[in-house]
Image (tube, rainbow, N blue to C red):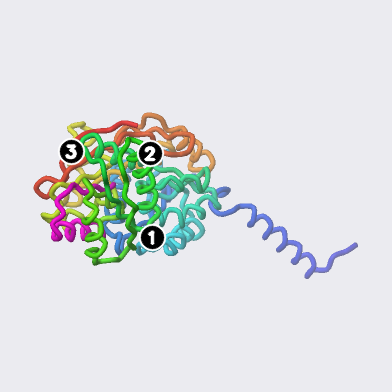
Amino acid sequence: MKLCRPTLIFFALVVALSLACERRSGTAEQSTTGDILVGMYGSLTGDGASFGQSSVEGAQLAVEEINNAGGVLGRKIRMLVEDDQSRPEEASSAVTKLITQDKVVAVLGEVASRRTLAAAPVAQKYQIPLITPASTNERVTQVGDYIFRVCFIDPFQGEVLAKFAYNDLKARKVAVLKDIQQDYSVGLTDSIQKTFTGLGGRVLDPVSYSSGDADFRAILTQVRAQKPDAIFATGYYPEAAIIVRQARELGMTMPILGGDGWVGDALKNGREALKNTFISNHYSGENPDPVVQNFVKAYRAKFKREPDSIAALGYDAAKVLADAFKRAGTTEGPKVRDAIAQTKGFVGVTGSISIDDKRNAVKPAVVLKVVNGKFQYVETIAP
């Protein structure tokens, strides 16, 4: 049967659309020339801006060093950055744009677990590897086999904090303030409760608050009446700094502990009230290891300020990705995913990084104490 011209055009369009659907953006048409496009998204504005800026700066420094050393696979890396405005819905949109419009071959970010959980399904859908520098909630990498992290996870971080409070601070009854809007805070709280009670301590019923709250005096007064030996404030730095300051104003002098979410502007916002506070963290700038000190020197020279742990993690995330490109011999998504999964003993600023079968980084944590307005190294705790 002879087909007329309109019918032929129709069938041609059907075939073209079918092929386009099979490509699933970014996985079948990787360029082998020109710059390697890597996306990064983060909270450059909004209440998490300190985190986003630090992680992007750390990654930018790493990319600059990689390119100055000749690049990867004979090509330069070009990092495209999107601001998610500290909002989960914007995080999802940012990653969608990076993958479907900008055609990046991999994504770095986010720091906050809630925003990574919002965006990770997009990367998984399009089979584009995503490495989060600092999202510690256990559920993050459970999204799928293209989602990785270079930080430790909350169950380990909570264990570190609980053991330090029980063994080093001799606390036996503790209170916990958790941010119910943040997956990070909820996960960290659960881990602290489990570990501390397992050690024989008592955890008072957690007191809840929400991101953006600015007056904690009422709930702190309730906590004070129960006379805990120590307090855990498991949220991020904007609220943690206020909690600490208002607790001190109410005469609460007991130790107050937090996780890596305190890193940011907590020192500036908490001021002198941060005396007798402790955090678990990913690295210490006081570490004499040449890898650490070279990073600190380079970051200080480029950005005119001291790097925090989020900057160090952003740096490590970019370096781990570049190492995976080299070992994969390509920027093709599935092969890069496999290379990241096979990362073992990678020497990073935040320690030796090995990726386990759940795509989490196996690495130590450090405990820091605030002394004279600075985080001071106390000890390292291995997994």
In the displayed structure image, the side of residue 31 where residue 6 appears, left or right:
right
Q: Which residue is mark 2?
A: 320
* Tally of marks: 3
> Could one spot residue 71 in this view of the protein?
no
Residue 370 appears left or right of 281: left
Q: Residue at x 31, y 34 (%)?
A: 364
Q: Is residue 251 magenta?
A: yes
Residue lying at the far bottom of the rendered structure: 6
Q: Give the SS element for disc 3.
A: strand
Q: Nearer the viewer, residue 135 or 17?
A: 135
Q: Nearer the viewer, mark 3 or mark 1?
A: 1
CA–CA distance in space, label 2 to label 1: 31 Å
Determine the secondary structure under disc 2. helix
Q: Are marks 3 and 1 in contact (CB under 8 Å)?
A: no
Q: Which label is found at residue 181?
A: 1
In the rendering, at what x and y percent does residue 3 appear?
A: 85, 65
The local crowd at label 1, few if under 14, some if 14 to 19, many if 20 or more residues have their Cα within 10 Å, is some
Please report whichever mark, 2 or 3, sits nearer to the chain's N-terminal start: 2
Question: Going from the N terminus, do you reach mark 3 or mark 1 first?
Answer: 1
> Residue, x 59% and y 53% (percent of image)?
24
Amino acid under disc 2: Val
Q: Position of residue 186 (x, y in %)?
A: 38, 52
On the question of residue 365 being in view, the answer is yes
Tell me which segment is drawn in magenta.
239-259
Q: Residue at x 26, y 61 (%)?
A: 219
Q: Looking at the image, which residue is at 30% across and 49% down?
A: 60
Where residue 104 appears, as percent x and y from the top left, is 46, 52
Circle 1: residue type: Gln
Q: Percent x, y for residue 119? A: 46, 56
Which residue is labeled 3 in the image? 377
Q: Residues within 10 Å of mark 3 (few under 14, many from 20)?
A: some
Q: Circles 2 and 1: CB distance less than 8 Å?
A: no
